[in-house]
Image: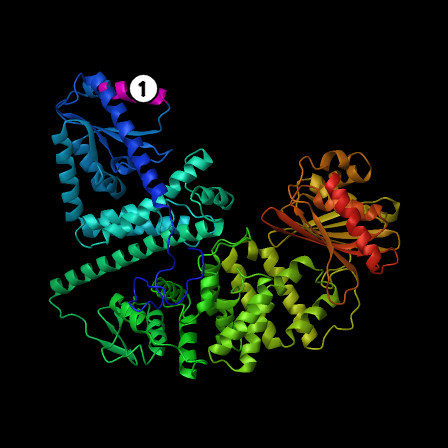
Amino acid sequence: MGRSRRLGRAGPHRRDGRGGSLTEVPWSPELSNGLAQQRRDRSDEADRLLRRLFVEATGSPECDGLAVVAVGGYGRRELSPFSDLDVVLLHDPAMPSPQVAEVANAMWYPLWDRRVMLDHAVRSREEMLATAEHDHRAAMGMLDARGVVGDDELVRMLRADVLARWRRRAHDRLREVRDTRAARIARAGWLAYDAIPDLKESGGGLRDSVTLRALTATWLVDVPREQAESLRTHLLGIRDTLHEAAGRGTDRLLPEMVPELAARWSLAPDEFDVGVRDLGRRIGHLSASAWRRIDEAFGRDRHRLLGTRGPRIELRAEGVGVLGGEVVITRDADPGSDPELLLRFAATAAQHRLPMNAAAVRRLASDLGDFPDPWPTTTRRWLVELLSTGRAAVDVWDELDMAGLVDPLLPEWAGIRLRGSSSPVHRFTVDRHSLETCARADDVSRQVARPDLLAVAALLHDIGKGQPGDHSDVGARMAERIVRRWGFSPDETDVVARLVRWHLLLPTVATRRDIEDPQTAVNVAEIVRTPAFLDLLAALTRCDALSTSEQAWSAWRRNLVLGLVAKTRAVLAGEGQERAYEGWPADRPMPELSGAESGALRVTSENHHDGSLVTIVAGDRRGLLADLAGALTAAGLSIRSARIVTVDTAAVTLWEVNRPDLDAQVLHQRLRAVLDGAVDLTARLTFTDGDQHPPRVTVLDAMEQTATLLEVRARDRRGLMWAVARTIADAGYQIRSAHSSTYGDEARDVFYVVDYAGDPLSDRAAQELCAVIHAALATI
């Protein structure tokens, strides 16, 4: 598990060993069995406690008309270290209420005194059935009801009635279950793909595994019980170790917990992470198959009621048709001599939003022949057809991957399969993020000249992750080999490889460079070369960011990228190359500067994207930018960018900050206090806690620039920009502009530094300044 799956390993859908299961899960059977026994032991211990309390309250373990019932996980004897105790005091409606209440109080209060996490209820059998009628979740919990002590006949009758009603109302109840599941997954995401999955609530998690038991109880569908229970047992064991490691009841698998949990299972962290996600993917696959068979059962019922004949096959492509609402392959089709059949089959399913027939998938997995190298034109076109179907392509690709049918198409996929991302802004695993990016490419396909190349680049843009080296460089070389193998021309191959190589160019430059400096757009234009490539790169950037997280495509980031694209497009069109850097955005009027030399201070603020744009005019002096940065930080604002322009003895600064609707008058008062020396910024902003990882200060090796670019990477802390700006001013240099980006808890600030003549620093001076900044950040 966690290693690239090689062709030749046997799997669930193949008899010849080609393809197969994603991983061989190496969960320790001794540890897994031991944890399962501990869950039973906890349940048994709770049983003994409840029996003793019941006997003390009633005088007998066999009190007629009264019983203690365990439901849910406790009913299944699956108590994790911090599980709630789900208990119902079940009574005959004829039993007097005071007597029932007396027994309940005699049991609940001792449990509360012991700080037992108790989820309790007191109900008659009729009340239990009524609750099950209007709450399918309660009904599912009652399917696992187990008598702990008391009247066994009362419990047996309850179980029989609940199960009978569950089966009788299966059509209605399963619609409710499906809707609730969809809403839950929309909130919690998928265990296999989310950056921080929930072992219980995520799709493919423990709640799905319990739902499978409830689906089986309807008699409408049969789930491979041994496989489902094995997967659930492993996942329960992982939750047990998570509870123990966290010291509390939690189901969220935080990345920082993975190394400790992996050590408990004697696995490497990556191996453990991929293995947990594989469990979730398998449970999700079983769930999808079960729901599909339920739909088929409902469909058969409709045909019987309507008296109609079953569906007939409809051919959609060579060897591929639709039968009974599923995509199938015909009897005369031969996957061995015609491997393209796989892509025709998959693309047809995605195009028509139809499920792939399970028998057809197994046949393809068993008999698929080798693809030629390079692929013929028709095969390549079917691949593009599949990748260009938007959201449908994600589900089809996942189904193919579960069957071991992605590796014959793209063996390199094994390197990113179920791999978590190291970036805190990513919400998906690398493979799912790649598929989501590809799906979003369909939304912008009409905005580019080659939507086919965009779709391919979207799928492959992170293919280099998990390999040594920069993933963009590594991925570009891998993409070149892949696309050539797929039969694209040399020019097309070059475009895709360059898109993969530069897929981070626009967001990196837009958020960490001064896009008002004409040289910035010139540098980008030298890389993109043509407007057509710029369009492709801009579209890929949008799709990549939207598939990453909301933070990656905030209004601020989006508008910076669009601004950079517009300026680069102008350069490519031959406009603006000769414009010198003036320091002030060309589309904004310069504010009034009179009076600044005599100490006047003017502050204006306007809403800008999802924050504010603050303009400050003051008298110029050394360290002004640092003082203003400190004042804005002390006012509770996070600074995204800053620029300063001096005219004679006046300075005008422009700040992008994170909060909208600022009161300029209040801000003026706070800035005035700092500039007048009434506020000690050193006392107010000095760091109070150390940085576990030392800061990194480097000179960016950029293309031609009109200033020296210093990058500071450190833990994001209040006052970081102020500390760096103050250090640069004390060293005798000026900051022309500064640009801040935050990734999780890491800040990446870039400072455009010049000497007091306005020129870039010499190499030696720049390196010395880096050392001074590093030392300053390490001591404050």
Please name whichever residue, 510 or 500, is drawn nearer the observer in this view of the structure. 500
Q: Main secondary structure of the magenta part?
A: helix
Residue 485, placed above or below residue 116: below
Q: Residues within 10 Å of mark 1 (few under 14, many from 20)?
A: few
Quarter-of-image position of residue 541: bottom right
Q: Is residue 445 above or below residue 87?
A: below
Task: Give me the residue at 25% from left, 36% from top.
Answer: 75
Residue at (22%, 39%) from the top-left corner? 144
Viewer can see residue 592: no
Q: Position of residue 261 (x, y in %)?
A: 45, 42
| Residue 3 seen by the camera | yes
Image quadrant of residue 58? top left
Counting labels gives 1
Is 46 part of what is drawn in magenta?
no
Q: Which residue is mark 1?
A: 110
SS class, disc 1: helix
Give the image location of residue 683, x and y in percent. Answer: 75, 33
Q: Residue 202, position in %: x, y?
A: 38, 48
Left or right, 694 with respect to 424, comes to right
Q: Residue at x 31, y 19 (%)?
A: 110
| Observer-nearest of 660 and 286 | 286
Amino acid type of the residue tagged 1 in the rendering = Pro
| Near-viewer residue (484 or 138) | 484
Direction from residue 758 to residue 313 in the image, left or right: left
**Residue nearer the viewer, 363 or 687:** 363
Question: Residue 317: x percent and y percent?
Answer: 31, 79
Question: Which corner quadrant holds the C terminus?
Answer: top right
Task: Report the residue at 53% width, 71% height from top.
Answer: 479
Decide: is 660 above or below 123: below
Left or right: 390 in relation to 578: left
Instruction: Identify the image's colour scheme: rainbow, by chain, secondary structure or one colour.
Output: rainbow
Residue numbers of the magenta segment = 103-114
